[in-house]
Image: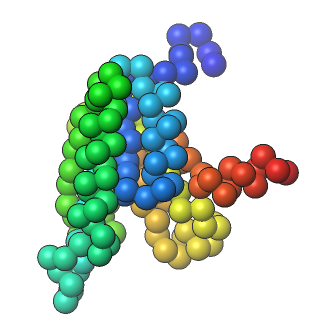
Amino acid sequence: MTAGHSAAFDLVIWATDGSENADLALEYAVKLARSRLLAVHVKEMGVGRSAGYPVHVDEEEREQKVRRQVDELKDAGVDVELELAAVASGGAAHVIADIARDAGADVVVVGTRGQGLVAGLLLGSVTHRLLHVAPCPVLAVPSRSALDDAEGA
C-alpha cells in the first residue's frame, strides 16, 4: 500500500444475489468496511412473455435471506443498510454501478459463479459486466471451490 492508503474503505457495497458465492463475498465486504456497508440486492425481472416475473423462481426466498443477513450484521454492530432494486434481466450490473456512483462507494464486493472465463463471457455474468461499468474498484471473490483449488495448488 502506498502512503495515505489503508486496507479498509469508508463505504463498501456488497452486491448480492442471495447465492452461496455472494455469502462468501460478504465475509470480505465486512472485513473491508471501515465505516459503512451497503448491501445491494437487485431482482432481475424477465423480459418478453415472462415480463413482470423474477428471473429466479426462488427470488422471494433470496430476498428474505438477504434481509436476515443484514439484520444479523446490524445485531453484530455493523453499520449496514439494505437497498433493493428491480430491473429487466441483464441490467443488474448497471443498477449496482449507479447505486455505487450515487452513494460514493469506495469499492463493490461481489461473488463469482466459479465458471471459467469463456462460460462467464457467454453467460454475461453480472460480475463480468460490473468490472466494466462500476465507478470504483470491484473485488470479485472467487467461489469456495476456486479458493480451495488455489490453496491445493
Question: Residue 88, can we see it?
Answer: yes
Q: Nearer the viewer, residue 132 or 78?
A: 78
Q: Residue at x 21, y 50 (%)?
A: 84
Tell me if 97 is positioned left or right of 34 in this view. Answer: left
Q: Quadrant of residue 73?
A: top left
* Residue 72 rendering spot, x and y as whole percentages: 32, 35
Q: Residue at x 36, y 38 (%)?
A: 13
Residue sitting farthest toward the left? 52
Q: Nearer the viewer, residue 87 or 59?
A: 59
* Residue 17 rendering spot, x and y as whole percentages: 37, 57
Q: Residue at x 44, y 31 (%)?
A: 30
Residue sitting farthest toward the right? 153
Q: Residue at x 23, y 80 (%)?
A: 47
* Residue 88 rendering spot, x and y as whole percentages: 23, 70
Q: Is residue 81 above or below residue 18?
A: above
Q: Is residue 131 above or below residue 28?
A: below
Q: Nearer the viewer, residue 147 or 2?
A: 147
Tell me if 16 is positioned left or right of 45 in this view. Answer: right
Quadrant for the N terminus in the image: top right
Q: How many marks?
A: 0
Q: Is residue 89 above or below residue 107?
A: below
* Residue 8 rendering spot, x and y as whole percentages: 49, 21
Residue sitting farthest toward the bottom? 49
Q: How is the image coloured?
A: rainbow
Question: Residue 99, can we see it?
Answer: no
Tell me if 125 is positioned left or right of 90 in this view. Answer: right
